[in-house]
Amino acid sequence: MNKLIDWKNRLKKGHMLSIICVLLIIVAILGVILYKKQTEYRQASENSYNMAFFELVDYVQNVETYLAKSLISTTSEHGAETLTNLWREANLAQSYLSMLPIESQELENTEKFLNQVSDYSYSLSRKNIYDEDLTQEDLTNLEELHGYSVELENTLNQLSEDLNNGRFKWGELTEKGTEAFAQQVDNISKESFSNLEENFHEYAGLIYDGAFSEHLTSQEKKGLTGDDINEEKAKQIAQDFVGNDSIKEIANLGLSENATIPAFDFSITNKNDENINISISKKGGHIIYMNTNRQINSEIISQEEALKKAKEFLEQKGFNNMQETYYLKQEGVMTVNCAYTQDGVIAYPDLIKVKVALDNGEIMGIETTGYLNNHTQRNVSNVKISGEEAKKNLNKNLQIETQRLAIIPTEWQTEILCYEFKGKVDDKEFLVYINAENGREEDILIITNTGEGTVVS
């Protein structure tokens, strides 16, 4: 009987041990699941904060750009458009700033600055809409706002770089509070949000494709001339364009019927085993694009040589009277924007982009969408005012460096013949476009010269 009781007791102990083991396993599984969920939540929050921050950076950059443009605008019509855009961008910057995990008191003056930019630009835009000129006091206030916007932009750019390098995470800020934020930022750069806030206490009261590239599409396709061709003809054109001697293999990828410009696409392998994609329009057999990618380990070709090679290539392929406008250098490749010129007048809508390898000057790509959409012979004689008369409508602070006639597109798919004035206000370069028919200010662009190229906005 004692043995039986002893056996039952051991059985109970074993049963309890099994239950405990099962419970421990369940707890462990739940812990893993909860940890995984928490990690996913933290990552989702981090991604959300990153998105808000980088959107904030973009909108603050736009605020700075529009403030700069507002300083040299001389017509109420264009001024109203610029100031309305400024009002919108400042509002959007405020929205994304409020999404960041930082106590409101830490950003109170930054928020106040963006709010006052928004309110002030809106009130000035109303003056312009009612055809009232901005006073000298208005311009002085805008100039002061622009100075603050540059400080804010510089600080955000520094933080953006450090965020990309992993020097701080938003999750740490939400856990440790704003004191940790100040410490993090002080460790990162000399110009922190805290320093920026001190500056704002003084204020009581802002591939690449180049200029006009957002208006390159057209329903009419003026440059798309000729009769329809078949696939075999398109293949022959592709081979001739690349060069038969350099081709190892060519594959037909079919007809893209629903594309903006219906085209036959081909994949070519050259004798260096590099892949080249090329597209030939169904109508007329025009080259739409050609592109190849390869590793470039050195930059031997200078900017001047690359620009020259791009222009020579276009001439060899039958694109005459093209002039380089802007360029961008990335990873050993220079992308050059070239626009058509007619009788000395540059036509920005007729845009072709050429990729030049900086190790040996090889042409790695071409894209002709703007040219095929818009190229035509234009009437460039409809000039009603002289260049000297056009200058009278410029901001008096603009130090003019060059002037020429240019055709620019509008958002309504039309074109305007303008005087293009390139000049400086302080250290910032501008392009100002004055209508050659009525003297109206049509557009203002900011030129940014970087180590990677010339960009306009």
Image (spheres, rainbow, N blue to C red):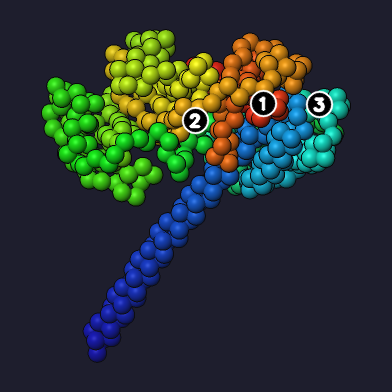
| In this rendering, position of residue 329 left or right of residue 411 | left
Give the crowd class for mark 3: few <14, some 14-19, many >=20 residues within 10 Å.
Answer: some
* Residue situated in front as seen by the camera: 288 or 179: 288
Callout in the foreground (2, 1): 1
Callout in the foreground (3, 2): 2
Q: Residue at x 43, y 36 (%)?
A: 222
Describe the element under mark 2 as helix, strand or loop.
strand
- Position of the C terminus, as image quadrant, is top right
* Residue situated in front as seen by the camera: 299 or 236: 236
Determine the image quadrant of residue 107.
top right
Q: Residue at x 42, y 19 (%)?
A: 322
Location of mark 2 (residue):
349
Determine the image quadrant of residue 338.
top left
* Mark identifier at residue 254: none
- Position of the N terminus, as image quadrant, is bottom left
Can you give x and y, in whole percent of width and height, for residue 370 in the image? 44, 33
Location of mark 1 (residue):
437
Describe the element under mark 3 as helix, strand or loop.
helix
| In this rendering, position of residue 335 left or right of residue 326 | left
Tell me which label, 2 or 1, sits earlier in the chain: 2
Location of mark 3 (residue):
139
Residue 74 visible in the snapshot: yes
Give the crowd class for mark 1: few <14, some 14-19, many >=20 residues within 10 Å.
Answer: some
Q: Amino acid at mark 1?
A: Glu
